[in-house]
Image (cartoon, grey):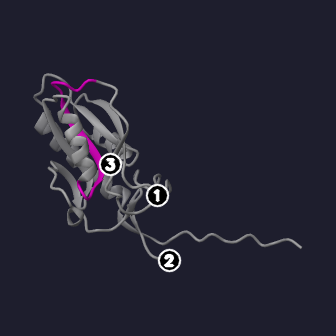
Amino acid sequence: MTETPAIQLEPSIRVLFTAEQIAARVRELGLEIARDLGGLTRRPVFVSVLKGACLFMGDLARATPLDVEFDFVTLSSYGGGTTSSGNVRLESDLRNDIAGRHVVVCEGVVDSGRSLTFLIDLLKQRNPASIKIATLLDKVPCRKIPVPVDYAAWKIRDEFVIGYGMDFDEKYRNLPYVGVLEEA
Protein backbone atom coordinates (compact mmCIF):
# COMPACT_ATOMS: atom_id res chain seq x y z
CA MET A 1 0.00 0.00 0.00
CA THR A 2 1.44 3.35 -1.00
CA GLU A 3 0.92 6.40 1.10
CA THR A 4 -0.37 9.60 -0.36
CA PRO A 5 2.20 12.32 0.34
CA ALA A 6 1.01 15.11 2.57
CA ILE A 7 0.22 18.27 0.67
CA GLN A 8 2.12 21.25 2.00
CA LEU A 9 0.01 24.35 1.57
CA GLU A 10 1.84 27.63 1.07
CA PRO A 11 0.65 30.39 3.33
CA SER A 12 -1.47 33.13 1.88
CA ILE A 13 0.60 36.15 0.86
CA ARG A 14 -0.91 39.61 0.57
CA VAL A 15 1.00 41.80 -1.88
CA LEU A 16 2.02 45.06 -0.25
CA PHE A 17 4.09 46.55 -3.10
CA THR A 18 4.28 45.17 -6.63
CA ALA A 19 7.49 44.77 -8.60
CA GLU A 20 6.46 47.76 -10.72
CA GLN A 21 5.83 49.96 -7.68
CA ILE A 22 9.18 48.96 -6.20
CA ALA A 23 11.07 49.69 -9.42
CA ALA A 24 9.49 53.14 -9.76
CA ARG A 25 10.11 54.12 -6.14
CA VAL A 26 13.70 52.83 -6.14
CA ARG A 27 14.39 54.91 -9.29
CA GLU A 28 13.16 57.99 -7.42
CA LEU A 29 15.40 57.22 -4.43
CA GLY A 30 18.41 56.73 -6.71
CA LEU A 31 17.91 60.14 -8.27
CA GLU A 32 17.49 61.71 -4.82
CA ILE A 33 20.76 60.14 -3.63
CA ALA A 34 22.53 61.31 -6.79
CA ARG A 35 21.31 64.89 -6.18
CA ASP A 36 22.60 64.75 -2.60
CA LEU A 37 25.94 63.05 -3.30
CA GLY A 38 26.63 64.05 -6.91
CA GLY A 39 29.26 66.68 -6.15
CA LEU A 40 31.61 64.35 -4.28
CA THR A 41 35.20 63.95 -5.37
CA ARG A 42 35.27 60.29 -4.22
CA ARG A 43 32.62 57.78 -5.12
CA PRO A 44 30.25 56.82 -2.33
CA VAL A 45 30.21 53.34 -0.80
CA PHE A 46 26.87 51.53 -0.72
CA VAL A 47 26.83 49.05 2.18
CA SER A 48 24.25 46.29 2.07
CA VAL A 49 23.09 44.50 5.17
CA LEU A 50 22.97 40.89 3.99
CA LYS A 51 20.94 39.10 3.07
CA GLY A 52 17.72 41.06 3.15
CA ALA A 53 18.92 44.24 1.46
CA CYS A 54 21.00 42.79 -1.38
CA LEU A 55 18.30 43.13 -4.05
CA PHE A 56 17.38 46.61 -2.88
CA MET A 57 21.01 47.76 -2.94
CA GLY A 58 21.61 46.34 -6.41
CA ASP A 59 18.54 48.04 -7.83
CA LEU A 60 19.25 51.28 -5.94
CA ALA A 61 22.83 51.37 -7.24
CA ARG A 62 21.62 50.87 -10.82
CA ALA A 63 19.11 53.68 -10.30
CA THR A 64 21.76 56.06 -8.94
CA PRO A 65 23.55 57.80 -11.82
CA LEU A 66 26.88 57.90 -9.97
CA ASP A 67 29.87 55.60 -9.83
CA VAL A 68 29.39 53.75 -6.53
CA GLU A 69 31.34 51.09 -4.70
CA PHE A 70 29.72 48.09 -2.97
CA ASP A 71 30.50 46.49 0.36
CA PHE A 72 28.59 44.16 2.65
CA VAL A 73 28.02 43.29 6.29
CA THR A 74 26.02 40.50 7.82
CA LEU A 75 24.17 41.13 11.06
CA SER A 76 21.99 38.72 12.98
CA SER A 77 19.16 39.47 15.37
CA TYR A 78 16.18 37.39 14.20
CA GLY A 79 17.26 33.76 14.31
CA GLY A 80 14.38 31.79 12.82
CA GLY A 81 11.53 33.90 14.15
CA THR A 82 9.51 36.87 13.02
CA THR A 83 10.59 39.26 15.76
CA SER A 84 14.02 40.54 16.65
CA SER A 85 15.72 38.92 19.62
CA GLY A 86 17.16 42.30 20.58
CA ASN A 87 20.70 40.91 20.50
CA VAL A 88 22.63 42.05 17.44
CA ARG A 89 25.74 40.20 16.28
CA LEU A 90 28.19 41.07 13.51
CA GLU A 91 28.63 37.91 11.47
CA SER A 92 30.70 39.34 8.59
CA ASP A 93 32.41 42.69 8.32
CA LEU A 94 33.24 45.16 5.57
CA ARG A 95 36.16 44.25 3.35
CA ASN A 96 37.25 47.82 2.54
CA ASP A 97 38.34 50.88 4.49
CA ILE A 98 35.63 53.56 4.66
CA ALA A 99 37.69 56.30 6.36
CA GLY A 100 36.91 59.62 4.69
CA ARG A 101 34.28 58.01 2.45
CA HIS A 102 30.57 58.84 2.14
CA VAL A 103 28.60 55.72 3.07
CA VAL A 104 25.02 54.86 2.14
CA VAL A 105 23.76 51.98 4.29
CA CYS A 106 21.12 50.02 2.37
CA GLU A 107 18.53 48.19 4.47
CA GLY A 108 15.48 46.21 3.40
CA VAL A 109 13.51 47.07 6.54
CA VAL A 110 14.23 49.38 9.45
CA ASP A 111 12.13 48.30 12.41
CA SER A 112 13.28 48.38 16.06
CA GLY A 113 16.40 50.38 15.22
CA ARG A 114 18.66 48.05 17.21
CA SER A 115 20.52 46.53 14.26
CA LEU A 116 20.88 49.86 12.52
CA THR A 117 22.14 51.58 15.68
CA PHE A 118 24.67 48.78 16.13
CA LEU A 119 25.84 49.19 12.52
CA ILE A 120 25.99 53.00 12.63
CA ASP A 121 28.06 52.86 15.82
CA LEU A 122 30.40 50.33 14.19
CA LEU A 123 30.80 52.41 11.03
CA LYS A 124 31.38 55.67 12.94
CA GLN A 125 34.43 54.08 14.58
CA ARG A 126 35.95 53.84 11.09
CA ASN A 127 35.75 57.62 10.46
CA PRO A 128 33.62 57.89 7.33
CA ALA A 129 32.96 61.36 5.91
CA SER A 130 29.22 60.74 6.30
CA ILE A 131 26.67 57.98 6.82
CA LYS A 132 23.26 58.06 5.13
CA ILE A 133 20.56 55.43 5.59
CA ALA A 134 18.45 54.19 2.69
CA THR A 135 15.69 51.66 3.30
CA LEU A 136 12.96 50.15 1.23
CA LEU A 137 10.60 49.89 4.21
CA ASP A 138 10.54 51.95 7.38
CA LYS A 139 8.50 50.31 10.16
CA VAL A 140 8.20 53.42 12.32
CA PRO A 141 5.65 51.88 14.77
CA CYS A 142 8.24 49.24 15.74
CA ARG A 143 10.98 51.72 16.62
CA LYS A 144 12.58 51.08 20.01
CA ILE A 145 15.66 53.23 19.33
CA PRO A 146 15.47 56.40 17.22
CA VAL A 147 17.57 56.12 14.07
CA PRO A 148 18.10 58.56 11.22
CA VAL A 149 16.50 57.32 7.99
CA ASP A 150 17.53 59.60 5.15
CA TYR A 151 15.84 57.79 2.26
CA ALA A 152 12.77 55.58 2.72
CA ALA A 153 10.71 54.19 -0.11
CA TRP A 154 7.71 53.59 2.17
CA LYS A 155 6.68 53.78 5.79
CA ILE A 156 4.69 50.73 6.80
CA ARG A 157 2.86 49.47 9.86
CA ASP A 158 3.98 46.56 12.02
CA GLU A 159 3.69 43.61 9.63
CA PHE A 160 6.20 40.87 8.89
CA VAL A 161 7.22 41.35 5.26
CA ILE A 162 8.77 38.95 2.77
CA GLY A 163 10.00 39.10 -0.79
CA TYR A 164 12.41 41.32 -2.70
CA GLY A 165 15.29 39.93 -0.62
CA MET A 166 13.47 39.64 2.70
CA ASP A 167 12.68 36.23 4.07
CA PHE A 168 10.89 34.06 6.55
CA ASP A 169 13.19 31.24 7.61
CA GLU A 170 15.22 31.67 4.37
CA LYS A 171 12.11 31.34 2.18
CA TYR A 172 10.47 33.88 -0.17
CA ARG A 173 13.56 36.07 -0.78
CA ASN A 174 13.21 35.68 -4.55
CA LEU A 175 9.65 37.01 -4.78
CA PRO A 176 9.67 40.05 -7.10
CA TYR A 177 7.26 41.92 -4.82
CA VAL A 178 6.97 42.70 -1.11
CA GLY A 179 4.24 40.78 0.63
CA VAL A 180 2.85 40.03 4.05
CA LEU A 181 2.36 36.47 5.25
CA GLU A 182 -1.30 36.09 6.20
CA GLU A 183 -2.45 33.61 8.81
CA ALA A 184 -3.53 30.33 7.27
**Pointer 2 residue:** 184
Task: Give whichever of discs 2 and 3 has the lower sequence position.
Answer: 3
Relative vertical location of residue 123 with respect to residue 143 in this rendering, above or below: above
Q: Residue at x 27, y 40 (%)?
A: 63
Q: Nearer the viewer, residue 146 or 135?
A: 146
Instruction: Residue 161: name its quadrant.
Output: bottom left
Look at the numbered disc 3 and give the secondary structure of its residue: loop
To which residue does mark 3 refer? 88
Q: Which residue is mark 1?
A: 80
Residue displayed at 85% across by 71% down: 2
Residue range corresponding to the magenta coloring: 97-113
Q: Earlier in the sequence, mark 1 or mark 3?
A: 1
Q: Is residue 99 above or below residue 103?
A: above
Above or below, 146 against 102 in this view is below
Tag 2: amino acid: Ala
Q: Secondary structure at mark 1?
A: loop
